Amino acid sequence: MLHSVTTFTDFILEDEEKYPQAKGNLPLLLLQLENAVKIIASHVRKAGLSDVLGQTGKVNAFSEEVQKLDEFSNSLLIKTLTSSGQVHTIVSEELSDAHVASPNGSYDIFFDPLDGSSNIDTNNPIGTIFSIYHHTDNLLKKGSEQIAAGYVMYGAGTVLVYSSGHGVNDFTFDPAVGSFLLSHINIKIPQEGNTYSINEAYFPKYSDPMKQFLSQWKEKPKASARYVGALIADIHRTLLKGGIFLYPTDSSHPEGKLRLTIEVNPIAFLVEQAGGETFATSSSPLDVTPQHIHERSPFIAGSPTNVKEYKKYV
Ligand code: P6P
């Protein structure tokens, strides 16, 4: 019996049929994005063997040391998305300013080409995060205006998690086929989970309510703590197993560390599409109007019961 195999290409072409009035060609944009992440995955898998490891001696928009694989991934994504002709403006973690790719492009894309890059040389999970909007001259758009978002996790396998506003699906790369194949259909986050995910080294720098929230977690009989240090890995586990991820403000990160437009909004879009809840300072980050393209934000995301409990404390 032939298994009903669905590739990412099948999926986005079927998805496109729901938007007959679409101005641009989103499938073409997504297929070019897929080509780029396949090449990135190939380099990540060989990172230990080729010269793309290590530092470039340059710093990015956040004055963080740029790893060679970061720079390679950024340049590759810009090139392949530009050649699609569908992207007007690109905002990347690795670019200080917005970049106009195609003046007639119908979409704006925000991405982190390689998130969690400190994990590269220890062979831990890293990922690409992307967020897509209809093009507008004003780039400071609320996350609720996203038309699609996703991430690719280069972990034990290469997994693409994607939503265009009708639920979340994930696709696992099959090297034998050379395509991403549908693997989790309509992901729904568990209503409640036993795992909390936060960098507790910052505990002394948290607010008192945050300290109380964390301390009561340790009283839970089934509690466990998991923290990879790569947003996509910690979120992927939370989506599938439930629980709560937190990167709150602390005295050394008064606005939080994660980037609102490039990391927080795409992930918040996916978590809410999977039935989860998210929080920034006073609401979902998707309701926040950014003041600049590289704005940082606190970010809490996970199972509804766990996030509601958090909100009671803070
Ligand atoms: P910390 C990776 O550098 C990143 O931007 C996210 O992927 C991750 O969640 C966070 O920073 C980790 O930050 O301060 O715990 O090392």
Image: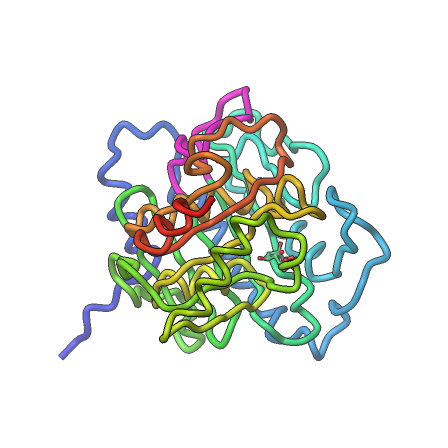
Q: What residue is drawn where x is 60% and y is 26%? A: 291
Spot occupied by residue 13 in the image (x, y as percentages of width and height): 29, 48
Quarter of the image with the N terminus is: bottom left
Spot occupied by residue 190 in the image (x, y as percentages of width and height): 28, 61
Q: Is residue 37 left or right of residue 74?
A: left
Residue 278 to residue 85: above or below: below
Q: Residue furthest top?
A: 137
The mark total stands at 0
Give the quadrant of residue 219.
bottom left
Asked if one can make out residue 187 in the rendered structure from this viewpoint, the answer is no
Display coloring: rainbow
Residue 112 to residue 105: above or below: below
Give the quadrant of residue 174.
bottom left
Nearest to the observer: residue 281 or residue 113? 281
User: Is residue 147 found inside the magenta-colored segment of the image?
Assistant: yes
Spot occupied by residue 83 in the image (x, y as percentages of width and height): 56, 42
Ligand 1 falls in which quarter?
bottom right
Nearest to the observer: residue 63 or residue 174? 63
Q: Is residue 12 left or right of residue 46?
A: left
Q: What residue is drawn where x is 33% and y is 43%? A: 164
Spot occupied by residue 41 in the image (x, y as percentages of width and height): 55, 67
Asked if one can make out residue 299 in the rendered structure from this viewpoint, the answer is yes
Q: Is residue 307 left or right of residue 53?
A: left
Q: Which residues are magenta?
A: 132-148
User: Is residue 195 found inside the magenta-colored segment of the image?
Assistant: no
Give the quadrant of residue 183.
bottom left
Q: Residue furthest right?
A: 57
Q: What residue is drawn where x is 24% and y is 48%? A: 14
Q: What residue is drawn where x is 54% and y is 68%? A: 227
